[in-house]
Image (tube, rainbow, N blue to C red):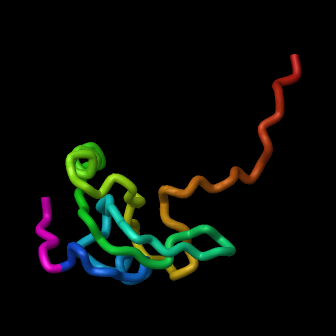
Amino acid sequence: MMSIEGRIGSPMSWPQIRQSGAYRGRWVALDNCKYDGRTAQPLEGTIVDADDDLAELCTRIRQSDNKHCAILFCDEAEDETSPPSSVRRPSTAPITPAQH
């Protein structure tokens, strides 16, 4: 696990988090999240914890006082408008029943 001391408890914007090498490729637990009212995407939050292993992170969150965190995967920051990878994107083609 990579050390992230000094950033825990620090409010950061989602684009700042995504650009940070300390969080890229890791799961990040955010508290006090502010969301975009139009897209419902996170704008910023207070970093509570982060880990490469989602199960480990969830275990620590369950054992802590931070029960209402948003947990997001921090992928590469292509641009600031890209939604976090934990958001399910709609498929491009509707699923239709097979004709027999």
Vertical arrangement, residue 63 with respect to residue 86, above or below: above
- Residue in the foreground of this view, choosing between 97 and 16: 16
Vertical order, 27 against 6 (above or below): above
* Quadrant position of the C terminus in the picture: top right
Q: Relative to the observer, which residue lies in front, 19 or 60?
A: 60
Expressed as whole percent of the image width and height from the top left, the position of residue 13 reads 41, 82
Q: What is the magenta range?
A: 1-6
**Does 18 sit left or right of 59 as displayed?**
right
Please give left or right for residue 22 compared with residue 93 in the image.
Answer: left
| Residue in the picture at 56% in, 69% down | 41
Q: Residue furthest top?
A: 100
**Tally of numbered discs:** 0
Q: Which image quarter: residue 69?
A: bottom left
* Magenta stretch prevailing secondary structure: loop
Tell me where residue 90 appears, x and y as whole percent. Answer: 69, 53
Which quadrant is the N terminus positioned in? bottom left
In terms of image quadrants, where is residue 25?
Answer: bottom left
Q: Is residue 71 left or right of residue 26?
A: right
Question: For this rendering, which residue is in front, 26 or 42?
Answer: 42
In the displayed structure image, the side of residue 35 where residue 31 appears, left or right:
left
- The location of residue 68, given as percent across then percent down, is 39, 56
Q: Is residue 14 above or below residue 68?
A: below
Classify 64 as above or below 99: below
Q: Residue at x 36, y 67 (%)?
A: 31
What residue is drawn where x is 29% and y is 57%? 66
Magenta segment: does it hold 56? Answer: no
User: Which residue appears at 24% of the width and 75% of the height?
Assistant: 9
Residue at the extreme front of the image, as rendered: 65
